[in-house]
Image (cartoon, rainbow, N blue to C red):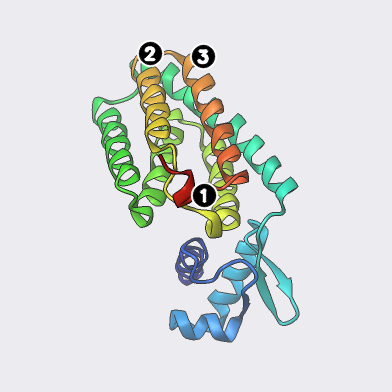
């Protein structure tokens, strides 16, 4: 369906920073960029407004970034939902309801995420990190939690895009992913939930205080 295609492509452009927060978009401009008619673009803009990524502005829309208080709330919701999906995934693993191939896929994306993060490949690390958490949510088998997380992830990604950088504590972040993967693989729901919640809240702390490399005088 043309509307779905327009929505998907426009979402990618917003999440990728082509249309950063504050950008004003019109149906005509977006339709020209996507080489589509204005009708599916109009519907796509309405859908993205419902998801909180854009808001009406005159005859167009503006790409939205959450304010700090709203971002705090988004991370709180993300932490709660990711704790839930990690718990559910671990419980399903304990019950033998996750296929070995699906578990290997999670292990693979975890390894790729760790490599991209350690090598400071931001363009690869950001989508891989999201894919890691998305895979866990998919393994949880709760469609509503996954849909809600997708919306929260989108809002957080757009709102933190300008401050994104490969984590200064990349080894620590990878270790948290490893702990989460281990808890799910071993079928330990409570541990998986605790690790997932702590990981998300730690991530919020990092985005609240962006990493600044030490000056020459501060280096040993």
Judging depth in this view, the residue of 202 and 142 nearest the camera is 202
Q: Secondary structure at mark 2?
A: helix
What is the C-alpha distance between the residues marked 3 and 1?
35 Å
Q: Residue 162 appears at what percent x and percent y? A: 55, 60
Residue 198: quarter of image: top right
Instruction: Give the quarter of the figure containing the C terminus.
Output: top left
Mark 2 or mark 3, earlier in chain: 2
The answer to whether the residues at label 2 and label 3 have Cβ atoms under 8 Å apart is no
Residue visible at 53% across and 32% down in the picture: 82
Question: Can residue 138 be seen here?
Answer: yes
What is the C-alpha distance between the residues marked 1 and 2?
42 Å
Mark 1 or mark 2, earlier in chain: 2
Mark 3 or mark 1, earlier in chain: 3
- The answer to whether 66 appears left or right of 144 in the picture is right
The answer to whether the residues at label 3 and label 1 have Cβ atoms under 8 Å apart is no
Q: Secondary structure at mark 1?
A: loop
Q: Local crowd at mark 1 within 10 Å, few (<14), some, or many (≥20)?
A: few
Judging depth in this view, the residue of 87 and 143 nearest the camera is 87
Q: Nearer the viewer, mark 3 or mark 1?
A: 1
Q: Secondary structure at mark 3?
A: helix
- The answer to whether 52 appears left or right of 19 in the picture is right
Q: Local crowd at mark 2 within 10 Å, few (<14), some, or many (≥20)?
A: some
Instruction: Give the quarter of the figure containing the N terminus.
Output: bottom left
Residue 212 is tagged as 1
Count of all numbered marks drawn on residues in the image: 3
Residue 94 is tagged as 2
Q: Nearer the viewer, mark 2 or mark 3?
A: 3
- The residue to which callout 3 is attached is 190
Residue visible at 59% across and 39% down in the picture: 204
Q: Local crowd at mark 3 within 10 Å, few (<14), some, or many (≥20)?
A: some
Q: Residue 209 appears at what percent x and percent y? A: 60, 44
Q: Residue 160 appears at what percent x and percent y? A: 57, 54
């Amino acid at each position: 369906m043309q509307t779905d295609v327009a929505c998907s492509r426009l979402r990618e452009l917003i999440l990728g920073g082509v249309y950063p927060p504050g950008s004003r978009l019109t149906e005509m401009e977006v339709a020209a960029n996507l080489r589509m008619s204005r009708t599916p673009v109009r519907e796509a803009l309405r859908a993205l407004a419902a998801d909180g990524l854009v808001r009406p502005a005159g005859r167009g829309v503006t790409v939205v970034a959450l304010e700090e208080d709203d971002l705090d709330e988004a991370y709180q919701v993300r932490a709660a939902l990711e704790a839930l999906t990690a718990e559910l995934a671990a419980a399903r693993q304990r019950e033998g309801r996750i296929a070995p191939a699906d578990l290997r896929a999670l292990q693979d994306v975890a390894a790729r995420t760790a490599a991209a993060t350690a090598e400071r490949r931001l363009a690869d690390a950001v989508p891989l990190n999201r894919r890691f958490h998305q895979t866990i949510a998919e393994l949880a088998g709760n469609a509503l939690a996954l849909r809600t997380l997708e919306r929260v992830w989108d809002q957080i990604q757009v709102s933190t895009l300008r401050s994104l950088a490969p984590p200064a504590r990349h080894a620590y972040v990878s270790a948290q992913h490893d702990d989460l993967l281990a808890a799910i693989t071993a079928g330990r729901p409570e541990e998986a939930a605790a690790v997932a919640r702590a990981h998300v809240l730690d991530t919020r702390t990092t985005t609240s205080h962006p990493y600044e490399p030490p000056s020459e005088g501060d280096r040993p």
